[in-house]
Structure formats: C-alpha cells, structure tokens
Amino acid sequence: MYTLFKPCEFYQRCQCKRDQGSSLYLADCSELNMTQILKFPNTIVKLTLRINRLEMINDGIFFDNKLLRSLDLSFNRINTLSLSSFIGLEKLKELDLQYNNLSDISFTHQWSVKLQNLVYLNLKGNSYDEYQPDILSLVKLEILKMDFVFKNTTILNRQFGDLKRLKRLDFSGLTGHCSAPFLTPNTFKNVPHVRNISLAKCKLRSLQKGTFNMMKNITFLDLSKNTCLKFQVLENVSADLQFSAIKFLKVNKIHKVFDMNTYLQTTHIMHLHNTSIQELHMDSNRLQHVERGAKKVSTQDVDLFISKRQHVFPRTLHDQFGRTLIPIPYNLKTLILRSSGSKHNITEIDLSNSKLESVDLSNNILTRWIGPLRNLKNLRYLDLSSNLYSNVSTFFFSPDFYMLKELILSNNLLGLALPSDSHGNTFQHLLSLMTLDLSQNRISKIPKLIFKSQRKMEFLDLSDNFIENIDFQLSHLIKLSYLDLRNNFITFLDTHTIVEINFLVDKENNLSINMFENKLVCTCNSKSFIDWMGSASVHIIDKNHYFCQLSTGKRVLMENIPEIYKKLEKDCTSYEKLTYGLVVTILLFMIVLVMGVCYRFRWKLRYLYYMVKIRSRSKISQIDKDKNEYMYDAFVSYADEDQLFVHTQLLQTVEKENNIRLCLHKRNFLPGNDIATNITSAIHNSRKTVVIMTYHDYLKSYWCMFEFNMARMESIYERNNENVLFLVVFEQISACDFPLQVLEVVQSQSYIEFPNDEQGDVVFWRQLVAALE
C-alpha cells in the first residue's frame, strides 16, 4: 500500500513512507536519540518519535500539522503536558504516551482540550501512584489504555461516564502498572457502556458480587494472572455476567503454580448457562478435578480452552466391551488440552454427543495411539504434535474421521511406526484430508501406498526428517499444491519421482516444492535431476539458494542451474566414454582369459562334463573298484580304416586265444547314447585303453583324438596317474608329426610298434597280451 521514499526532505535520519497516489507521508523517527521535537512539515499523517530522549513538548510545536492523524511519543522522558502541547492536532485520532514520566501532577487542567477527535489513547507505564487524568474533553475516545493503581477505594470517577463512545478499557498489568486489590459494585458503575475490559495481572485479591452487574454490554473480560482469586471468584463473576452480552471470558492462571487439589465446581460457572459465551479460557490452573455437570457451561456454541500444565480427570464410563465412553458437553466445538502434561495411552474411545470440530492435544505424553476413536464425524482439525508417540495402530483413525481436513502430527516418533505400514492403512479413512504435517518425526522411509486415500490433500509437510528417497506414490495427489521436503537427506530425485511430479504439473496443478537444506549432489548420477530443476515448470522454492556437492566433494551454490548442468553434461560425457571403453576392455580381457583357460583345460572340462553325465544317467550298478574289477580289460581306440586289423588279428589273438575282454565301438557301444558319452563310459569301465595309432587315419580323425584325450584325462583324474594308455604305433611316424599331447605321452610312457616280419609278430602279440593281462 505504501512506497518507500527516502531520505526525508525534512529530516534525513527519519524513514518515510508515502501514501500511494497522494503527497502525504508517514514518518518514523524512532531510536535517534532526539532531545527535542523538531518542526515537521504539514504533509505528515503519522509521526513516530518513540524511544528517544524527549523531555517536553514545546508549546505550539505541532501547530502546522493539521493533517496529523497518529502520534507516537512512547518510551521517552516527557514529564509535563500543557494546554498548548497539542495545539494544531485537532484531527489527531491516535496518541501513544506510554512509558514516559507522567504522573497526576503532569497533566495540567484541560491538557486534552485540543484532542476532541481522539479515538485511541495509551497512558500506560507512567506512574505507580493512584491517579485519574483529566480526559473529560475526549468525547470521541473509544480505546483507553492506562495504569490502574489504587490502594483503598477503587472507583472510576464520573468523567468516564461522559465518554459515551468508550468501548475498551485496558488496565492490564501485563503492559503497564496495575494494582487494584479490591473491586466493588461501585468500581465500574460509571462505565456501563464499556464492552471490553482487561484486568489481567492487577494483583486482585477480592472481587465482590455486583462488580460487573451494571455492565450488560460487556463482551470481553480478562481476569488472568490474578493468582489470589482462585476459582471461587467465578461464582461472583458468572452471577454478574448472566444475561449480559459476554462472549469471551479469560480466567487463566488465577491459581498459584503450586496450589493443590484445584477443583472446578458446578456453582462456579453455573450462571454461564444464561449467557451466549463463546470462549472460556482457563489455562495454567492445574485443574485436578471437574465436578460432573460443570462441563456444560452453555446451551449455545462454546469453545473450552483448558491447557498448559493442567491435569483434567473428567468422569468417564466403560461399557460391557471395555470401551471408554467420554461424555462431551453438548454443542462443544473446540477442545484444547495443550501442554496439560497428560501421560496416557489412547485406547478404544467413544465420544458421546460429540459435535467437536477442533481438537488440540499437542505437547503432552500420549505415547501410544491404539484406538479406534469413534463419533468424531464433525471433526475438521486435529493437533497431536509433540507427544513423543512411536506407536500408532492402523485402525486408530476410524471411519468417523472422514471429515477431517487438517492433521498435525509434527515432532513425534512416527519414523518407528509408518515404515511398516506397507498397505497404507494408517490414513486410509482420512478421505477429506487437505493438510498433513509429519515434520520432525525421524522418518527415514515412507511406504509407497501410505497416502493412497488422500486425493484431496493440498499441503504435505515432511520437513526435518531422515528421508533419502521419495518412494511413496505421488501421481494421484492431483490437488497437491505444496510439498515440504526441507532438511532431509535427499541427494536427488530419481526419474520415476520426476515423472510423477511432472504428471501433477501437467494436470494444471500449481505445485510448489521446498527442498532447502538437503544433501543434494551434482554428479553424473543426478544429471537428469539437475536438468529438471533448471527447466521444469514445477515451482521449486528458492532453488537458486540451494547448495549441491560435486563429485570432488566441493559444495557449490546452485545460483545458475543451467550452467551447472552444461558443465556436468560435458564432464559426464567424457567420463561415460572412458567408463564405456574401460568396461569394454575389461570385458574383452575377461572373455579372452576365460576362453584361454577353457582352451587350456578343454579336455579336463569335457571329461568332467561327460563323467557327470554318465554318473547321473547310468543304470548299471557300480563296480567294486577296490577289487580292480572292470567291465572290460581294454578299450580299443582305432580308426575305421584299421578295423580289418582290429576285428581279425587283434580280436582273434587277444580276446579269443587269451581270453582278454575287449571293448570295440562297432560292437559294444550302447545304441541311443551319444558318441561322446559312449566313448567316455567305455574308457571309464575299461582297465586299459589300447590305441592303434596311424598318422594318416588316426591322428587325422576327430573321434580318435577324442578317445585318446579322454583316456589321458581318465588316467590323470580317476586313476591317480596310473598308466592306462597302451600305444600301438601301427606305422612309421616321425616325432615331428605327433601332436603335442600325443608326443608328451610318447616321450613319457612306453609304446610298441607293429612289426612287419613274421618273427616280430610273435614278440609283438606276446608283449601286448602281457600288458593287458
């Protein structure tokens, strides 16, 4: 409404505001150590000179200030007011003289005669002595704040009766000096038209019946912090106020801090039945017991405030099922039990006759919420903050909470309970909830479905927790306008969360997110998040004031997010290429290494494979190896081109003439099995393996070499390096023509060559039979 205009043309140390669209000013000359009032131009409508060192008001100093409406001279050293002090201020409406050195002798006769349009006057904090200043001329005065100090008789004089527009009297000792030990029916007899009286902290000891009897227009009465009155005074007060216009009655702390057995009786407040009272404040009275019937203070709508270190034990009932039944005053809409020190578990409770709309149970010790709570169908607001609870059942909020709009659960220990609610049953009945405060709950993880029923939610506060990731579902919260994630452990929002938030934005939802004071990082992993922060249509509050940590560990201010993203994209591109190349190199190296190892041990691996296969499929009972009994004495490995020699000479001489059992693949292999399995099985079940080796046929045959290598693996891994191979070189082969694995066997083991003469044949067959027996 006002625009700043500085410096002031008339006094450069004052701060001035100009009324928009006009040439009038509001001048603030506070705390400038001024010792005298200067001449101010006639363009000022409000002048503040508070907290200076002014000792007097020069006669006629405001003569030119015809337009001045408000004058603040509080907190100075002014000790005298004369008839000429306020000449020129005929249109002044507000005058503040609190906390100067004014006393009963400081006010000259008719000092206020020029202030006939004054509406507001503050004279508080000036004197500890009994005095009543001359204010007879202030015929338009509506609000008067003054010290109220009396030693004996406490009576407001007749001049107050002429102030017909006076509506509010503030005598409170909270902001000034008030000492009125005794109030009688004559105290306020001259101000029956006053509507608002504050007598808080006035050292009241006695308040006689009839003190407020004449004040039928009174709507507000404050008797708080008069600790000598006690609840007994309420009987006189309520009797005086019956049939009056009273709406707000405050009797906070009218008992001393350590008073015991504070007891509110029916007689204390029964006359309030005859009023239209709306609020009754009874804070800090250490209320121990409420007499049955005393809770029904009005037949009209009434808010009951009982808070701050009070212990209330209303009469409760229990039904046959063990449920607690609490009777609620008829038409009671607001219940405040804040800071009452209550230490209870909230079990199954039914509230009878409940029309409660607002309940405040904050700052107590309600550690376990079991429930359910029933008959709260009108409840709109519930505050359970600061209760140290760590256990809330999934049925605590019953279906009767369906009208609840605002739920405050801050400063508790919900982080111990909510993560286990994977099905989202805790808040499932809060269908109308619009505001949910879960701040300061040590929450580290929020289940995905925890807010599944809150489609109307607009405000969600998760600040001051230990949240690292946004795991809960967001896309259905189409009315969400503010998400508070301040002071958590979030490093960045993942792609799924960003997609859900963008979905809400696409629904024309004006969503604002606050992620201030998190552990944000600006690394390659968070690149998409940084890009989203810089370009998303969602409103991220004060995002240019966030800090993020680089991969080097340095924290930087995110004042230019697009620039940070460009640098990040450049660094990450080269990093990704390097990483990709390194991964490919390592992968190729591993492939080559594995292939080399497999090639190096190819025959061992193949042998082991077929041995496992044989043992898992074999239907033949195991032979007793301890007795060296085998199915065959020898397995003959030969090329098909040499089968004539094997099936005529070898078979005739070795098997038929010398009774040595031979295994030949043409004769003894099991039909249906694959060749490799038959070969491995035959070698394993034969005591020896005879190799009929030829250069052109055997060494060139794949299956012949397979049989040779399988026999070699058998000797190494099954026979403890026993020599089971018997090489018969059927034709002349040069050493350079042998493969490496054959040459190794030839050089380390004995072999026999097939002779080409008749005499050599005899020796050959004798040696062969001897080797196989």
Image (tube, rainbow, N blue to C red):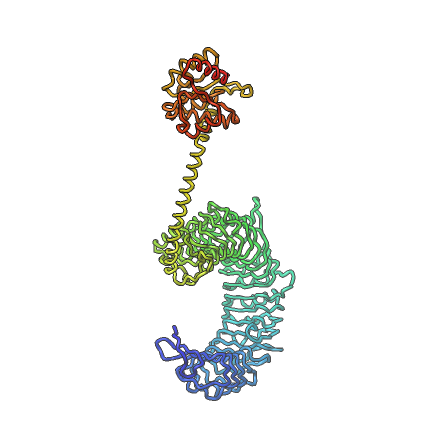
What is the x, y in percent for residue 518?
46, 58
Relative vertical location of residue 128 with respect to residue 411 in this rendering, above or below? below
Relative vertical location of residue 420 with respect to residue 551 in this rendering, above or below? above
Say which of 174 and 240 sits in front.
174
What is the x, y in percent for residue 290?
59, 58
Residue 96 visible somewhere in the drawing: no
What is the x, y in percent for residue 189?
54, 75
Relative side of 762 to 505, left or right? right
Please state, as top left, top right, bottom left or bottom right, where the N terminus lies in the image: bottom left
Name the image quarter holding residue 648.
Answer: top left
User: What residue appears at the point 40 percent right and 63 percent down from the top-left corner?
Assistant: 559
Count the marks: how many? 0
Residue 754 visible somewhere in the drawing: yes
Say which of 712 and 377 sits in front.
712
What is the x, y in percent for residue 687?
49, 20
Residue sitting farthest toward the top: 657
Say which of 326 and 585 sits in front.
585
User: What residue appears at the point 49 percent right and 86 percent down from the top-left corner?
Assistant: 36
